[in-house]
Amino acid sequence: MPDARAPDRVQTVKRHGRVERRSLWMAPCGDLSPYLEQACAWPGAQWCGWIERTRWRAGREETHCHVWIAGAAFPWPLTPDDALARLQAHWTIENRVFRVRDVTYDEDRLHGRMIGHGLSSIRNGAITLLRQLDYRYIPDAQRAIAAQPALAFALLGG
């Protein structure tokens, strides 16, 4: 995906037992902005680009490219450092909420979406309450609750 020009920003971090390099390319949307508003319902798109993430873990290399679009929320010129920080913040939300719902609560397999917003609200409430226990992983918090039912009632205010 990346073009022949050098990335606008390269960041290398070592965390969670792996080394990851993030290379970010970005460009103003320009004439693409009206198309994105009409075809994709993305009003005010100002910046677009892609990020290439290369991870090394246990001797294996994995590379993934992701396209991104940023819009009207930026009344100032978006810098590559700012774009990289905002993309990282987005992944934090993905990992803390949606991955927990997909993996821990097995939401994709159970099709709880058909039950509606009520079940989704209950799951979000449960995740919020479990995070108050300061466990790093939700499954650890679930095991603590299962072993100590009084803790569950304390979380619920009972």
Image (cartoon, helix red, strand yellow):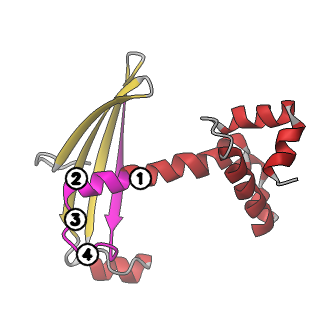
Seen in the picture, residue 28 relative to 127 is either above or below; the reply is below
Residue indicated by mark 4: 32
Q: Quadrant of residue 14?
A: top left
| Residue kind at label 2, given as amino acid type | Asp
Can residue 116 be seen in the rendering of this structure?
no
- Mark 1 or mark 4, whichever is nearer to me: 1
- Secondary structure beneath dot 3 equals loop
Q: Which residues are magenta?
A: 62-87
Q: Is residue 5 left or right of residue 44?
A: left
Q: Reading the chain from its start, which is encountered first: label 1 or label 2? A: 2
Instruction: Characterize the local packing of mark 1: few (<14), some (14-19) or many (20 or more) Cα atoms within 10 angstroms.
Output: few
| Residue kind at label 4, given as amino acid type | Leu
Q: CA distance from mark 3 to mark 4?
A: 17 Å
Q: Is residue 59 left or right of residue 148?
A: left
Residue indicated by mark 2: 81
- The answer to whether residue 79 is magenta is yes
- Mark 2 or mark 4, whichever is nearer to me: 2
Q: Nearer the viewer, residue 92 or 46?
A: 92
| Residue kind at label 1, given as amino acid type | Ala
Q: Which mark is residue 78?
A: 3
Residue located at (32% from left, 52% from top): 85
Residue 18 picture location, percent across and down: 39, 25
Instruction: Characterize the local packing of mark 2: few (<14), some (14-19) or many (20 or more) Cα atoms within 10 angstroms.
Output: some
Q: Reading the chain from its start, which is encountered first: label 3 or label 4? A: 4
Q: CA distance from mark 1 to mark 4?
A: 25 Å
